[in-house]
Image (cartoon, rainbow, N blue to C red):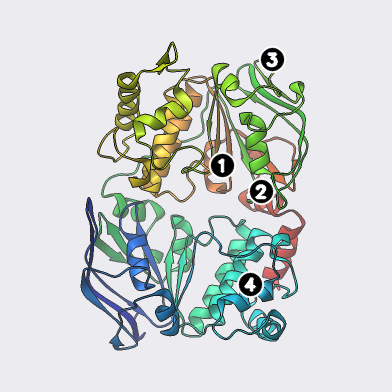
Amino acid sequence: MGAGLSKLLEIKGISKRFPAVVANDDISFEVARGEIHALLGENGAGKSTLVKIIYGVMQSDSGSMSLNGAAYAPASPAFARASGVAMVFQHFSLFEAMTVSENIALGLKDGGTGAQCAPRIREFSAKYGLSVHPESCVGDLSVGERQRVEILRCLMQSPSLLIMDEPTSVLTPQEADGLFITLRKLSENGVAILYISHRLAEIRELCHAATVLRAGRVVATCDPRRESSRSLAEMMIGTTLAEADAPVRPAGEIRLEANGLSAPAAGPFGVALRDINFSLRAGEILGIAGVAGNGQTELMEALTGESLTAPDMVRLHQVPIGALGASARRRAGMAFAPEERLGVALSPDMSLTDNAFVTARDTMSLSRYGLLRMTTAAEFARSVIEVFDVRSSGPDQEARCLSGGNLQKYVIGREILQNPSVLVASQPTWGVDASAAAAIHRALADMAAKGAAVLLISQDLDELMRLSTRFAVLSDGKLSEVQETKSVTVEQVGLMMGGARGFEERRHVAA
């Protein structure tokens, strides 16, 4: 707790046990008024369980909490909100077909109608620099604007403690800068912020204090402004962190091409692809940057074969494949790691062995004469677990029981061990901790170094700048010119990702 700051939230000996794991084990720390306090840890370290206890989603087995000097034991999120605790979740909970004011009114007790709520929205918007129009339809807003709506809805509850879970994971650098200005204003006004993020550079820039969890226990407290990103990561994982660099192997023959690739929007709020062109060569990582909702879903579906195009719009090894489905593309040497882990890449209720069949049935000969080879599939799943250090009880464990980082390592490992000539990976480290991200980065870099071609679709600019040899930016369904990564700065890429909105954001932040 910072010097001269009074205590707002005190946590003493909080523990929470589940049948197979101790999620929180005797956790104790304090958060001061006006303090931006980071909660750090690997996936599975206990962060999500702890903030759910603070917000009343679940109750602890033992220990106690106090808020503003009084005993605090929220039985529900409604009780927490009434006590002055608000939370901005990683995944937005907004109705896209409704206006900003209608969404905010729904989230407020006695909020009235959207029209009645609009004046207060303008007041809070001006006070905290969260520029949104109450009458705007949420479906028309950028990701950064939607996050402002979520924050405004929390601030209009007049919280004393604001919990934020991965708030910049879908923002451009300019939008993140704007968010930091708002959070600092809240801090100056005495609001405490409990901040969860895997982006350690922003933790060092923004936060006054940090509590580090590992395996459900507090293992360190520090002032992150006095630490490096590496030292914070090593506190989290308890060992030395090894990082990967972009491959230096000279690029070889063209493996994958998009030629005037166009495709309709995926749903009413999707973005149509418009004349996408690129070539991906053996031994390189081609990065595709962009803010979520700018056509990444449509591009991934067009490349994987989930949506079909004219044959020549997608070529693999010079052969037109735009009209082929996903299975045929896999048999031809492609592999895919989609953004959505559970429900798309993996079936949550199936074991890791059963999930091996989802993509590797043909390439790894997991079936013969129409019969499933369960022993072979289990051996393949066990190989993925061992090679990629997937923390699990074994091939028979259900996918839903794994943490996000371990799910992602399994997905990436399952694809890489099929030895594809081309891998298309979308948001491969989204929401995972530093250790899991480093492992995935090393795997992608090693794959390219061995001669495979990797297409990396990501919103994480640090990831793209470190790993990719060339990159382009996807904005509003159009792809920029492919450039050498070393020829541009993160600032320039961020503005390209934001498009026109990015430049408006920059002027707003400067003002």
Q: Are marks 2 and 1 in contact (CB under 8 Å)?
A: yes
Residue type, mark 3 in image: Val
Q: How far across and down, in percent of the image, does residue 77 sit?
A: 42, 74
**Structural distance between the alpha carbons of marks 3 and 4:** 49 Å
Residue type, mark 1 in image: Leu
Who is closer to the viewer here, 208 or 328? 328
50 shown above or below 471: below
Q: Closer to the N terminus: mark 3 or mark 2? A: 3
Callout 4: few (<14), some (14-19), or many (20+) C-alpha neighbours within 10 Å?
many
- Secondary structure at badge 3 equals strand
Q: Closer to the N terminus: mark 1 or mark 3? A: 3
**Structural distance between the alpha carbons of marks 4 and 1:** 35 Å
User: Which residue is at the far bottom?
Assistant: 69
Q: Closer to the N terminus: mark 4 or mark 1? A: 4
Q: How far across and down, in percent of the image, does residue 467 sit?
A: 52, 37
Q: Is residue 471 visible?
A: no
Horizontal side of 292 relative to 234 (left or right) equals right
**Structural distance between the alpha carbons of marks 2 and 4:** 32 Å
Q: Are marks 4 and 1 in contact (CB under 8 Å)?
A: no
Q: Closer to the N terminus: mark 2 or mark 1? A: 1
- Rendered image: mark on residue 493: 2
Q: Which residue is mark 3?
A: 319
Looking at the rendered image, the quarter that the C terminus falls into is bottom right
405 shown above or below 371: below
Q: Are marks 2 and 4 in contact (CB under 8 Å)?
A: no
- Secondary structure at badge 4 equals helix
Horizontal side of 15 relative to 270 (left or right) equals left
Horizontal side of 5 relative to 127 (left or right) equals left
Residue type, mark 4 in image: Asn
- Secondary structure at badge 2 equals helix
Q: Which residue is mark 1?
A: 464
